Amino acid sequence: MTESSTNGRARALRDRLPGLVIEGVSVAFAVLLALAVDEWREDRSNRQLGARAEASVLAEVRTNMERLDENAAARDSLLTYLAGVRAALERDKELGSISVDFTPAFLATTAWETARVTRAVHFMDYDRVARMGRLYDFQNLYERSEESFVERVSGIGGEDWSDPAETVQSLERDLARVDAFGDELQEVYGRILELGFDASVDEEETRRVELGR
């Protein structure tokens, strides 16, 4: 190979080099652009999933508030009935028939549990997820107070009726506690529905309810 031939090829390569660089940069840019578009689409899909999950949870909260509101009337009616029974017992100390009919509110958790299982919560604002968690913890406390009262009512036949008025009064106290929990939960629901999950669920309030204070 002659020196002139070698020089010719070197010149040809130098001439082509800018085009090769431009072509390489173009390919790299196209790849990066495709990756960026895919990432943007995935991010948008994730944000949409998070938004749908949050909307479902808010709808569930609204339904639960309506159920709890309906249940409040039944609680108040039962409290009035128990107070009347106790007053009658305090007057004559004789126990007639007593019927304690209590139906729990059956509050839903499906939307919240689904958001957790599908990991939709990972695509939601952290503070909002924390508030949702505290809300459902608070709701669980209320349901536990309901369950405790239902267990008490189911065992009413085995109660010690040596002091009927005191026994009925203790049922009143238990139901009043359920009623107080329900009222506080309704307030929390109201704040959440008014402001979305930007509303706060007080951790101290949750602890206080858990301790039954």
Image: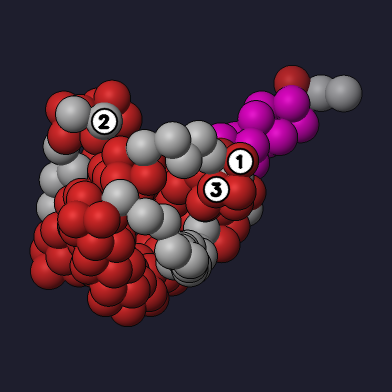
- Element carrying mark 3: helix
Chain-order first, disc 3 or disc 2: 3
* Three-letter amino acid code of the residue under disc 1: Gly
Judged left or right of residue 206, residue 119 is right
Q: How far across and how far down the image is residue 25, in percent? A: 51, 45
* Residues drawn in magenta: 4-16
* Three-letter amino acid code of the residue under disc 2: Gly
Judged left or right of residue 28, residue 164 is left
Q: Can residue 207 be seen in this view?
A: yes
Q: How far across and how far down the image is residue 110, in percent? A: 56, 62
Q: Quadrant of the C terminus?
A: top left
Judged left or right of residue 154, residue 6 is right
Q: Quadrant of the N terminus?
A: top right
Disc 3 and disc 1 in contact, CB within 8 angstroms: yes
Does residue 190 lie above or below 126 as drawn? Answer: below
Residue at x 50%, y 35% (from the top left corner): 160
Q: Callout 1 environment at 10 Å: few (<14), some (14 to 19), or many (20+)?
A: few
- Element carrying mark 2: loop
Q: Is residue 87 magenta?
A: no
Label 2: which residue? 212
Outermost residue to the right: 1
Disc 1 and disc 2 in contact, CB within 8 angstroms: no
* Three-letter amino acid code of the residue under disc 3: Ile
In the picture, the disc for residue 158 is 1
Q: Nearer the viewer, mark 1 or mark 2?
A: 1
Label 3: which residue? 156
Chain-order first, disc 1 or disc 2: 1
Question: Which secondary structure is most common in the magenta stretch?
Answer: helix
Q: How far across and how far down the image is residue 99, in percent? A: 48, 67
Does residue 118 lie above or below 57 as drawn? Answer: above
